[in-house]
Image: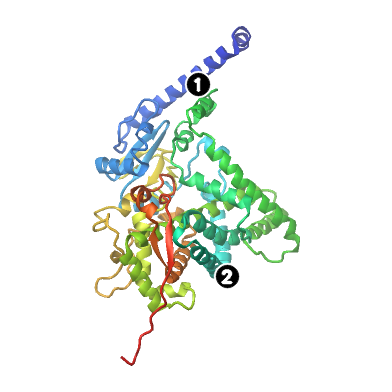
């Protein structure tokens, strides 16, 4: 009654102002309460924050990676900070990550996913990356089984990689001294490999819908601007009239994630509709999408309630595509960049290729066991660059004491993989690029290091690791088998920015061009000498 009287007696702008102030006041009280709650407990140390904003003004400084490196030096293995209402706990050491994510005591406790209203409105808690509990277990099992059938253990996957490799070589030859911006060509090559597995579909060079799909996934992963943090720490801002419009006027793209998800989900729905229309004539699945729809059809006839619905499928397809494309393509980009910057490493990889494979056939996955230096080079690329510096956010599912500190239910857990990969206690000269660190000193054999964890740790580790390793080896060896790489002179001028790279979920190198020169014919030893 009172509100209706106010609404009649006050101008609409005044009502809006009162509503905004009321919501802001409630938000301030709530944020103060949450902050006080954490202060009363034994929280991990961290930087002092600002009222309401928390540590948002400290990010980035000058980059997200740099800020966390500074905090790690100051505060140690566990660091906590706030972005608005949400507290983040960063695991900075290998021991902390291993204990939190892979131990029997804490593995399940820290296996949750972010559960804000904003994120749930986008994902509905579905997919594999975004889900948890029984839904996550059921669909991870299903995805692993299907991907083994259509990817990891399938000879056709190697054929698909070889097709993309041949196409890349042709593009390198055509480009000549103008060089190649590897961003698009490598992303498309890797995207086509995963697309064949998921959709049974290889995109052509003029496929606008596929191009938009790729662009949307890249923007969501590689962007590091302010907009990424607003929905995580300040979900109530979305409820205050005019605030979103004000942020837009200030140049903050607050709807970037929603806009890109609309594109990716739309592309997946198009593929779902096309596959469903042809499913009646399919006796066995040709790709992941077929397998899911056939499982869905089977469950529809058995029980009313199941989790194999279309939105779960769209989320799973989007997540598998994103996980299988951007990280792998950018790892190869870093590898080719480092091949340019460390020509002695490039020459040694090429010498091993010549000795073990030659130039007359494409590299095969079975060649890996005979190529220790190439494997060491790839491992050092993954360590030095660290494509997913903080992996994927985890959530603490209940109040718990961990390493002497109190971690609260719903705290967000970050694993500082970049910090682990550059930890001087684990690696000698961590800021030096040295593939030899992965070779046995006495025998020269390939020697994996348990502290290299580019695919994460524990139950939530990347399920596409086997495919990624296969792609990395075949593409890197296949490119350097026929071409030598050197940085374009224009890119040399911007080398520092290129090496810093992007500051988003994926750590990609800055834009650059590489000149790929056809290698000289392989010399054949003359036994008569």
Q: Nearer the viewer, residue 438 or 60?
A: 60
Location of residue 138 by image quarter: bottom right
* Camera-nearest label, 1 or 2: 2
Q: Nearer the viewer, residue 91 or 272?
A: 272
Q: Where does label 1 land, which residue?
A: 23
- Residue drawn at x 60%, y 59% as measured from the top left: 198
> Image check: 234 left or right of 35?
right
Looking at the rendered structure, the number of numbered marks drawn on it comes to 2
Location of residue 142 in the rendering, given as x and y in whole percent from the top left corner: 57, 58
- Residue drawn at x 66%, y 58% as measured from the top left: 295
Location of residue 57 by image quarter: top left
Among numbered discs 1 and 2, the one appearing first in the sequence? 1
Residue 292: numbered disc: none
Location of residue 345 in the rendering, given as x and y in whole percent from the top left corner: 32, 66
> Image check: 428 left or right of 413?
left
Q: Quadrant of the C terminus?
A: bottom left
Location of residue 350 in the rendering, given as x and y in whole percent from the top left corner: 38, 71
Q: Quadrant of the N terminus?
A: top right
Location of residue 13 by image quarter: top right
Residue 156: numbered disc: 2
Give the class, few, some or many, for how many residues have Cα within 10 Å of label 1's Cα (few <14, many ≥20): some
Location of residue 107 in the rendering, given as x and y in whole percent from the top left corner: 41, 51
| CA gap, disc 1 and disc 2 | 57 Å
Q: Residue furthest front?
A: 177
Q: Nearer the viewer, residue 491 or 285?
A: 491
């Amino acid at each position: 009654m009172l509100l209706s009287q106010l609404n009649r007696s006050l101008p609409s702008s005044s009502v809006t102002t009162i509503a905004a102030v009321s919501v802001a006041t409630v938000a301030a009280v709530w944020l103060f309460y949450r902050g006080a709650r954490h202060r009363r407990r034994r929280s991990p140390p961290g930087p002092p924050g600002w009222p309401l904003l928390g540590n948002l003004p400290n990010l980035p400084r000058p980059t997200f990676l740099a800020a966390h490196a500074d905090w790690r030096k100051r505060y140690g293995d566990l660091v906590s900070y706030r972005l608005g209402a949400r507290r983040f706990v960063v695991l900075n050491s290998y021991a902390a990550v291993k204990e939190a994510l892979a131990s029997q005591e804490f593995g399940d406790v820290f296996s949750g996913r972010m559960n804000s209203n904003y994120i749930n409105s986008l994902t509905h808690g579905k997919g594999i990356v975004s889900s948890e509990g029984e839904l996550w277990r059921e669909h991870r099992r299903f995805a692993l089984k299907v991907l083994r059938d259509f990817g990891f253990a399938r000879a056709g996957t190697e054929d698909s990689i070889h097709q993309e490799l041949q196409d890349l070589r042709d593009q390198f030859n055509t480009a000549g001294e103008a060089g190649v911006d590897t961003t698009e060509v490598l992303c498309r090559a890797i995207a086509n490999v995963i697309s064949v597995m998921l959709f049974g579909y290889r995109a052509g060079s003029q496929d606008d819908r596929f191009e938009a799909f790729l662009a949307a996934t890249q923007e969501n992963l590689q962007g590091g601007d302010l907009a990424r943090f607003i929905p995580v720490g300040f979900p109530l801002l979305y409820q205050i009239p005019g605030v979103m419009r004000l942020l837009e006027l200030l140049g903050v793209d607050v709807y970037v994630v929603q806009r890109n998800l609309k594109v990716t989900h739309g592309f997946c729905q198009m593929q779902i509709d096309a596959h469903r229309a042809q499913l009646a004539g399919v006796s066995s699945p040709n790709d992941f999408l077929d397998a899911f729809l056939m499982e869905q059809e089977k469950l529809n006839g058995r029980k009313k309630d199941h989790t194999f619905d279309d939105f779960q499928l769209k989320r799973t397809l989007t997540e598998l595509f994103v996980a299988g494309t951007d990280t792998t393509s950018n790892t190869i980009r870093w590898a080719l960049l480092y091949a340019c910057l460390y020509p002695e490493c490039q020459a040694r990889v090429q010498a091993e290729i010549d000795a073990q494979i030659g130039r007359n056939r494409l590299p095969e996955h079975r060649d890996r066991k005979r190529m220790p230096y190439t494997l060491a080079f790839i491992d050092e690329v993954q360590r030095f660059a660290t494509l997913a510096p903080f992996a994927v956010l985890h959530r603490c599912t209940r109040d718990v004491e961990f390493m002497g500190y109190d971690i609260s239910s719903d705290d967000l857990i970050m694993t500082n993989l970049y910090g682990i990969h550059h930890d001087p206690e684990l690696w000698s000269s961590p800021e030096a690029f040295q593939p030899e660190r992965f070779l046995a000193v006495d025998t020269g054999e390939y020697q994996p290091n348990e502290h290299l964890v580019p695919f994460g740790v524990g139950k939530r580790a990347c399920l596409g690791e086997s495919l990624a390793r296969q792609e990395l080896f075949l593409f890197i060896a296949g490119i350097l088998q026929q071409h030598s790489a050197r940085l374009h002179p224009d890119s040399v001028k911007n080398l520092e920015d290129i090496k810093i790279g992007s500051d988003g979920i994926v750590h990609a190198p800055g834009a650059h061009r590489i000149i790929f020169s056809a290698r000289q014919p392989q010399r054949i030893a003359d036994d008569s000498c």
